[in-house]
Amino acid sequence: MTTERLTAEEAIRKHCNTEFSKTDGTEQVYSSLDAVIIALTEFAAQEVEAEIKKLMPSNKKINEAARAWAKDHSNAPDKDCPEWILQDYEAGACFVRQCFGCLNKEVEAVEKQRDELLEALKNITDPIGYMRSKLEAGESLNGHYAIQLANDAQYLRGIAEAAIINAQTE
């Protein structure tokens, strides 16, 4: 069963209470921090899953690539032989090593993106800690204002949106 991918906004709407402001017409989130975290976790999980699906080649593509590579690099007498890997083991082993090397680079990029999205979720769960981490040397946090921001869904949504935009541009 295939489910349609949600945007970050759709995930938030699915799990959170939202309404449009009567003063400026912007959409406001009126839900607990837990609901926002659940929504963003769902969004992050689907994005990582989609990236992994894009990176995983089909068996047909792997087979075609293996045959093309073997024809170019094999010393086997019959380069069209489907059992080329048995006739020229080292050529096959080299191809497999190259495939895993390329796949590992792609997986590392997806894992980096996942880690950045998880870091954003951590910042949302501890917004005051996040604010402290952004302070320059000698600066201090305004406690009252920090508490107000920590309870402001729009501020937390901004952290999430910045992480999502950053993940989509990389």
Image (cartoon, rainbow, N blue to C red):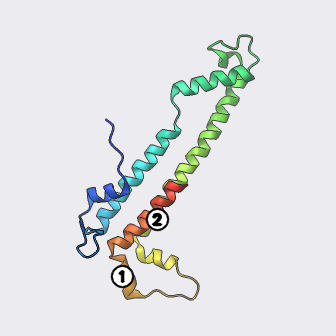
The x and y percentages for residue 137 are 59, 85
- In the image, 140 versus 4, the foreground residue is 4
**Which element is circle 2 on?**
helix
> For the point 32% across and 63% down, which residue is it?
36
> Against 29, is 105 above or below?
above
The x and y percentages for residue 8 are 37, 57
> For the point 42% across and 78% down, which residue is it?
128
Snapshot quadrant of residue 143: bottom left
Q: Work out which residue is located at the far right of the displayed protein and give it.
A: 75
Q: Could you tell me if residue 121 is visible in this image?
A: no
Q: Could you tell me if residue 126 is visible in this image?
A: yes
- In the image, 20 versus 112, the foreground residue is 20
**Which element is circle 1 on?**
helix
Mark closer to the chain start, 2 or 1: 1
The answer to whether residue 22 is left or right of residue 133 is: left
Q: Nearer the viewer, mark 2 or mark 1?
A: 2
Q: Work out which residue is located at the far front of the displayed protein and give it.
A: 24
**Badge 2 is on which residue?**
162
Cα separation between marks 2 and 1: 21 Å
The answer to whether residue 131 is left or right of residue 96 is: left
> For the point 23% across and 73% down, which residue is it?
22
- The N terminus: image quadrant: top left
**Badge 1 is on which residue?**
147
Label 2 sits on what residue type? Answer: Ala
- Crowding at dot 1, Cα within 10 Å, few <14 / some 14-19 / many 20+, comes out as few
| Label 2–label 1 contact, CB within 8 A | no
> For the point 44% across and 45% down, which residue is it?
49
The answer to whether residue 20 is left or right of residue 41 is: left
Label 1 sits on what residue type? Answer: Ile
